[in-house]
Amino acid sequence: MMNIYQDIVKKNIGILKEIDEIDKIRNKVMSQLGIDGDNSRLRAALIFQWLFRLYAQKMGEAHTIKIVRKMVKGII
């Protein structure tokens, strides 16, 4: 019975490490975008994210990915 609990704890520690890594990456990206300390920029980014998800749901993910690829190729 104790082995079951030990396995659960080991799995959860792995998950916590992954969550910590994701949080570090999120903070790094927010810093690069300049929204780490500015709530108005964070709010604008969240609104854009919400609108982009609505667009992707309405137009389809494949269509949205094609458009983003074209935009990225035009920038680079």
Image (spheres, rainbow, N blue to C red):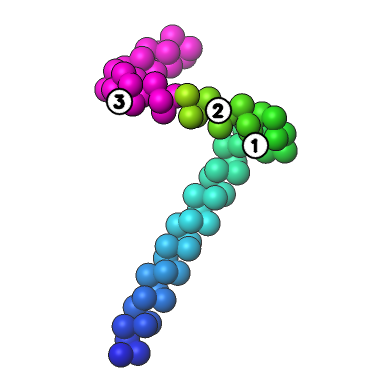
Is 55 colored magenta in this rendering? yes
Q: In this view, does 58 lie to the left or right of 38?
A: left
On the image, the x and y values in percent for residue 5 come to 37, 83
Q: Give the range drawn in magenta.
A: 52-76
Task: Identify which amino acid the numbered label 2 is placed on.
Answer: Ile
Question: Which dot, 3 or 2, sits closer to the camera?
Answer: 2
For the N terminus, the image quarter is bottom left
Residues at marks 3 and 2, CA–CA distance in whole angstroms: 19 Å
Instruction: Give yes or no for residue 22 being in the magenta stretch.
Output: no
Query: To which residue does mark 2 refer?
Result: 47
The furthest residue to the bottom: 1
Mark 2 or 1 closer to N-term? Answer: 1
Q: How crowded is mark 3: few (under 14 residues within 10 Å), some or many (20 or more)?
A: few
Residue 61: which disc?
Answer: 3
Q: How far apart are labels 1 and 3 at the CA level?
A: 28 Å
Which residue is at 39% across, 21% downward?
Answer: 55
Above/below status of 15 relative to 36: below
Q: Is residue 68 above or below residue 2?
A: above
Which is in the foreground here, disc 1 or disc 3? Answer: 3
Q: What residue type is labelled 1?
A: Ser
